[in-house]
Image (spheres, rainbow, N blue to C red):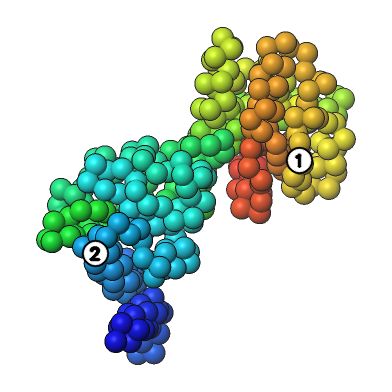
Amino acid sequence: MALRKSSIIIASIGWLMNAPYWVYHILHYHDVIEHLSGETYLSVMVIGTIPIFTVLGYLWDKQVQLGRGVSLRSDILHALLENMEDGFIVYDKSRRIIEASDRAAEIFGAPKEELIGRRCTDLVKCSIEQCPVLDVFKRKESVFGEVCEQRRLRVGRKKFVKISSYPVRSNGDVEYVAEVIKDVTESALKEKEKETLSAIKEMPAGVKKEVVFKKITAALAEDFDYEASAIGVLKEEDKKIALVSCSANRQIRELAETMSMEYLGGPESCEALIIEEGLLEKVLKEKKPLVTENVHKLVMDQISDGNIKRLVSMLIKDAALKYCLLVPIVAGNKAVGIICVASAEELGENDAIRLVNFSRIAGKWL
């Protein structure tokens, strides 16, 4: 009897895990999906996933009621949580994390053990007061799709996550809040990129190019959280790159402040972004993006300022200048400059596309 009951539960969960799939295909078969707005479609898909979390809540509730000193997670729950594409976190009444899946730890960039005991506000910064957890405990109902900025627990660029929070009841009271965490960094950054590029395009034609370049490097460092960014312009007289603007993200600025250095953004601090001449020539000649690793090895011997040399040494220790992406600035089919970013994290295709878009804007002012 117990085996049959477990089999029924497992089979039911297996079916419910595919609920969004069946919802989509039923609607698509009847030509309904083509007539739904993006918002309505999202609502339908969210509704399709609700049974999954109803089952999770039921199993959790039963596990709590059983007691007997057993682990809070059953084997079924463990299998479900660890195989979800999204992260899963559980908070108790004190708003502290008591459970986290491996995927949640991966999204937040910290070991699972480091997440346990933390509050929601330690992990994310949301538009609603004190993040969704407190809201669920207060209202005793679910909160769907809140997009929050992830607070950094390790060196690396900030991320954006979409959080759906569900009350888990025991004897009618909300004892826990279960959260599903989805990494939406790229979609959030693409939206931000559109806004930033649009704002720069709308700048008056008479604005000095230095002002435009500063806006670009500041956006790359502050909005997109690259550790450092710079723009260099090719000088006609000697065909060398002259750095005209550079910026650093908050982490590096704070690091500079601990050394009583000025805000990274002046011409001297741009020395920290000097790249081996051969690489610059390669990018200008081929007019293609280039990613280089261990950028700190390229710059250390070329830095003359002692303070900046110490700063770069500290950045090497934290691996904050591990990767560098260089993109040519092209005007009239001619490479006239370079835009680059440095990062602690590996730089990929999305970063290259983003930098190419900014290089096109920069090219209009050269």
Image quadrant containing the C terminus: top right
Determine the residue positioned at 62% across, 48% down. Answer: 351
Determine the residue positioned at 59% across, 12% down. Answer: 259
Image position of 91 with respect to 307: above or below? below
Asked which secondary structure carries label 2, the reply is: helix
Determine the residue positioned at 77% across, 41% down. Answer: 292
Dot 1 alpha-carbon crowd within 10 angstroms: few under 14, some 14 to 19, many 20 or more: some
Image quadrant containing the N terminus: bottom left
Question: Which amino acid is tagged 2?
Answer: Leu
Along the viewing direction, whichever of 54 and 139 lies nearer the viewer: 54
Mark on residue 293? 1
Mark on residue 66? 2
Q: Residue furthest front?
A: 68
Question: Which amino acid is tagged 1?
Answer: Glu
Q: Provide residue 155's location: percent of width, then percent of height.
A: 56, 35
The answer to whether residue 188 of the structure is visible from this angle is no
Q: Quadrant of residue 321?
A: top right
Image position of 273 with respect to 120: above or below? above
Along the viewing direction, whichever of 122 and 80 lies nearer the viewer: 80
Q: Residue furthest bottom?
A: 30
Q: Earlier in the sequence, mark 1 or mark 2?
A: 2
Left or right of 35? Residue 273 is right
Q: Quadrant of residue 270?
A: top right
The answer to whether residue 274 of the structure is visible from this angle is yes
Asked which secondary structure carries label 1, the reply is: strand
Image position of 134 with respect to 256: above or below? below
Q: Quadrant of residue 129?
A: top left
Q: Residue furthest left?
A: 172
